[in-house]
């Protein structure tokens, strides 16, 4: 039986508002928010939804960036588990105002951007994080930054104006301080597998993929967790007991993006924020989809691998990756298995993944010069909402004739699924209005969507059909089609190890 190395339990060590903390005795599923508001009595960080939707609990998390500097991001403290903070630094609203109001806080006051004040600390921390990371440049970027923050009494206008006042303001040069902080956090994180145990529950956090493989093989019933944007709700909403958890967010081998001429390779622990610009380079629709993917705090934590591995029928990325013909890399022990992504999803709640096997990476092809791509998300709210229908199409042309069609949908079945009958109706024909009409009719053979709180069955089917018609109308304008011209290339798979 494989044994994970260096499994002596250690305390959780991190910085909180610049001060060192060592925590023992807290259950591994204790959320960062409960720890802040409980033992630390830092009650400026609020609990609103306890599911990462409202942003009232937003804090700033910093960690080494792998090159001697610091990576900073906002996070929802309500769904971040406390052991995941090992080797990281957390800053709350109390620390931000330790020397009096900052320019951002002053702008919030002067623009009357707070009424009851409950949500205000979250907005301030989110805008502060946006300013530090250079994300605030204009009005739209300020709106995008706070898309994961809700206010029920002020209205967003004054908050946006306050954010605009600091947008573009120079960020202080903290390179020297960051280098020292990076070294100190790395020392806190420690070497080998971080193991924590309390009240009969265990938490493991490997830092390399081989240790992850060994740890998971030795604990095949463990729950894997990365950004906790899904698993966090198992605890805060479903009150589930999770006796053994393995944190993959510290595995450096899974936090890589490798670009090649013909495809892009995303390690499973790459966050949506880290992936967005690269995906937008494959096609702008992918970048736009990720702009609307949850809120900024969730994009900062949620991972590419997690969005695939949880098998959700309404995950936004899988239909896009399936339409592009992506492949999934699965690792178990020393063995590496490669499967077409569409084959990974078997049925609702069932994926082609054995015990002790984990998603290591996904390989996404770039578009060839004879391919056209389309992706669009339909949801009740524009920002930070779950899809009713997610559509992604990729057509390959031989001249004016469709030689291959890949039409993938989320929200239309129990798994992300291709519309095979609709695809067959397009192949061998020009993609004109007649072919689109026939393919739209064929979709009724592919799907019998359910009716739920987000949409009715009839609405989902009609919307899916109309999105294909929209794609056809867009392409009929021809000249503006967005294309990436690439050639074949090979990828180095050494990062995730194993034997393919």
Image (cartoon, grey):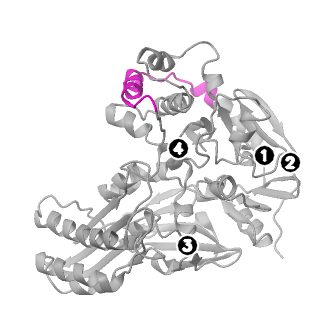
Name the secondary structure under disc 4. Answer: helix
Residue 427 is drawn in which quadrant? Answer: bottom left
Name the secondary structure under disc 2. Answer: loop
Looking at the figure, which quarter contains the C terminus? bottom right
Q: Which residue is rendered at x = 59% and y = 63% of the image?
A: 495
Task: Please give the residue where the numbered disc 1 appears in the rendered image.
Answer: 190
x, y percentage for residue 364? 42, 67
Q: Which contiguous range is marked in magenta?
A: 153-178
x, y percentage for residue 465? 25, 73
Q: Report, in whole angstroms, how far the alpha carbon at label 1 lies from the one at label 4.
A: 26 Å
Name the secondary structure under disc 3. Answer: strand
Horizontal arrangement in the rendering, residue 166 relative to residue 435 (left or right): right
Asked if the residues shown at circle 2 and circle 3 are in contact, with their CB atoms under 8 angstroms apart, the answer is: no
Q: Report, in whole angstroms, how far the alpha carbon at label 2 lies from the one at label 3.
A: 32 Å
Task: Please give the residue where the numbered disc 4 appears in the rendered image.
Answer: 297
Task: Please give the residue where the numbered disc 2 appears in the rendered image.
Answer: 10
Asked if the residues shown at circle 2 and circle 1 are in contact, with their CB atoms under 8 angstroms apart, the answer is: yes
Of callouts 2 and 1, the N-terminal one: 2
Mark 3 or mark 4, which is nearer to you? Answer: 4
Q: Which residue is rendered at x = 48% and y = 24% of the image?
A: 171
Task: Please give the residue where the numbered disc 3 appears in the rendered image.
Answer: 329
Name the secondary structure under disc 1. Answer: loop
Of callouts 3 and 4, the N-terminal one: 4
Residue 274 lies in magenta, yes or no? no
């Amino acid at each position: 039986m494989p044994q994970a190395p260096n499994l002596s339990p250690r305390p959780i060590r991190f910085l909180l508002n610049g001060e060192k903390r060592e925590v023992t005795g807290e259950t591994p599923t204790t959320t960062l928010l409960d720890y802040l508001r409980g033992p630390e009595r830092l009650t400026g960080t609020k609990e609103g939804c306890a599911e990462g939707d409202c942003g009232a609990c937003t804090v700033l998390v910093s960690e080494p960036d792998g090159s001697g500097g610091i990576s900073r991001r906002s996070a929802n403290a309500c769904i971040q588990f406390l052991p995941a903070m090992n080797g990281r630094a957390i800053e709350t609203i109390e620390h931000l105002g330790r020397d009096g109001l900052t320019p951002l806080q002053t702008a919030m006051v002067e623009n009357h951007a707070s009424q009851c004040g409950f949500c205000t600390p979250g907005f301030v921390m989110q805008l502060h994080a946006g300013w530090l990371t250079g994300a605030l440049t204009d009005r739209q970027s300020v709106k995008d930054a706070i898309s994961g923050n809700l206010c029920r009494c002020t209205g967003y206008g004054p908050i946006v104006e306050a954010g605009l006042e600091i947008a573009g303001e120079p960020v202080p040069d903290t390179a020297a301080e960051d280098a020292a902080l990076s070294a100190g956090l790395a020392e806190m994180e420690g070497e080998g597998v971080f193991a924590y145990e309390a009240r009969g529950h265990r938490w493991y956090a490997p830092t390399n993929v081989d240790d992850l493989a060994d740890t998971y093989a030795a604990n095949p019933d463990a729950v894997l967790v990365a950004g906790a944007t899904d698993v966090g709700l198992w605890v805060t909403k479903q009150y589930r007991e999770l006796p053994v958890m393995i944190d993959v967010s510290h595995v450096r081998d899974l936090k890589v993006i490798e670009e090649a001429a013909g495809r892009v390779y995303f390690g499973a622990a790459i966050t949506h924020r880290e992936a967005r610009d690269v995906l937008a380079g494959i096609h702008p629709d992918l970048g736009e989809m990720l702009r609307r993917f949850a809120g900024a705090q969730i994009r900062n934590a949620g991972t590419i691998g997690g969005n695939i591995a949880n098998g959700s029928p309404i995950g936004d990325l899988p239909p896009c990756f399936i339409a592009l013909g992506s492949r999934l890399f699965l690792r178990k022990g020393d063995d590496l298995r490669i499967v077409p992504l569409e084959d990974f999803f078997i049925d609702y709640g069932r994926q082609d993944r054995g015990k002790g096997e984990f998603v290591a990476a996904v390989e996404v092809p770039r578009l060839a010069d004879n391919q056209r791509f389309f992706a669009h998300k339909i949801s009740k709210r524009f920002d930070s909402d779950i899809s009713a229908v997610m559509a992604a199409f990729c057509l390959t042309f031989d001249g004016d004739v469709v030689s291959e069609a890949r039409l993938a949908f989320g929200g239309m079945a129990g798994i992300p699924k291709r519309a095979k009958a609709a695809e067959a109706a397009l192949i061998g024909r020009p993609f004109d209005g007649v072919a689109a009409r026939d393919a739209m009719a064929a979709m009724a053979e592919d799907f019998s969507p359910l009716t739920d709180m987000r949409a009715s069955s009839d609405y989902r089917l009609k919307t899916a059909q109309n999105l294909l018609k929209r794609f056809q109308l867009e392409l009929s304008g021809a000249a503006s089609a967005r294309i990436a011209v690439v050639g074949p290339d090979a990828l180095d798979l050494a990062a995730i190890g194993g034997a393919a």
